[in-house]
Image (spheres, helix red, strand yellow):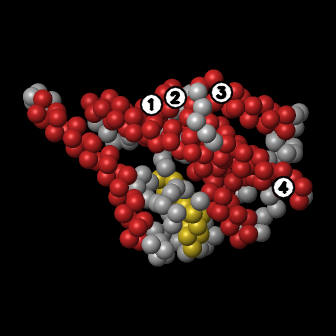
Amino acid sequence: MLGCDCCCISSFVYLVGLLTIASKVVPFLVKKFKGNKPVELQEKDYKKDVVYLYQFGGTPTASSLSPFCIKVEAFLRLHSIKFERRNTFTGRGQNNLLPFIELNGEHHSDSQIIVRRLTQIFKLKTYQDEQSAAIGHAVDRLLDNHTFNLILMAKQPVVGKVVEAGAVGVPAFLMPLVSTLGGYFMGQQMAARGATSVGKFNEVDRNELLRNDLLQLQTILGKKKFLLAEEPTTVDCTALGQFGSAYFAVPSAR
């Protein structure tokens, strides 16, 4: 195939284009026809009180490419909850997203809901008091929404490197094409999501807003070891997810 003429190359590019379109259309159709039916349990022979964490795979420097998957794993580790990772590229939860978990035969999706359900099921104390919990919730939402989307837009120029890191099993000779096409389409998605969530900004304004988020977090941190106390709380798991994913998951895409 490598020695073929442009007809074969055009066919291949066309195939990649179809696969790219399918990757967007198929999840939509699955969600549309699935409706609100309960999702099928993946781990039927489950162990009691063991969390099965379904997530995007990671890299040699991070357990997942997703900040939300890292957040859930960090929360599980913080509270010494037994868990097993289930890396998946195509799997999706009830909300058509990752991560999702299965625990004692029940499905829970969305990192926010997952943390809440784990707190309730295992009767965890996640903050020192109600005031800390309120501040933690506010900072958590800042990180997972405003800060996340600003980081997402800042990563747009290097998203091809993120695609490469996640393209496990793709032959080396196809990687440049996968990186270019995947980077383009994912970059468009990232820009659209960021613009919808926090606004459309030029690079200077976006960086100013992101820096302001970091400065506010620095002020909250002060001289403490963690954001709200001398011991980590739920919001530190969220912070680890966002900054761990941005900084450690793909070092070449910082």
Element carrying mark 1: helix
Residue 166: percent from the left, percent from the top?
43, 40
Q: Spatial distance from mark 4 to mark 3, Cα to Cα? A: 29 Å
Regarding mark 2 in the picture, which secondary structure is present there? helix
The answer to whether the residue labelled 4 contacts the one labelled 2, judged by CB atoms less than 8 Å apart, is no
Say few, some or many: other residues with alpha carbon within 10 Å of mark 1 (under 14 / 14 to 19 / 20 or more): many
Few, some or many residues within 10 Å of mark 2 (<14, 14–19, 20+)? some
- Taking the image as shown, residue 6 lies to the left or right of residue 176, namely left
Residue 146 to residue 219: above or below: below
Foreground mark, 1 or 4? Answer: 4
Q: Residue at x 81, y 41 (%)?
A: 226
Residue pointed to by mark 1: 161
Q: Is residue 26 above or below residue 67?
A: below
Residue wearing tag 2: 253
Q: Could you give the CA–CA distance between mark 4 and mark 2, rounded to whole angstroms?
A: 34 Å
Image quarter hosting the N terminus:
top left
Expressed as whole percent of the image width and height from the top left, the position of residue 54 reads: 51, 58
Mark 1 to mark 4 CA distance (whole Å): 37 Å
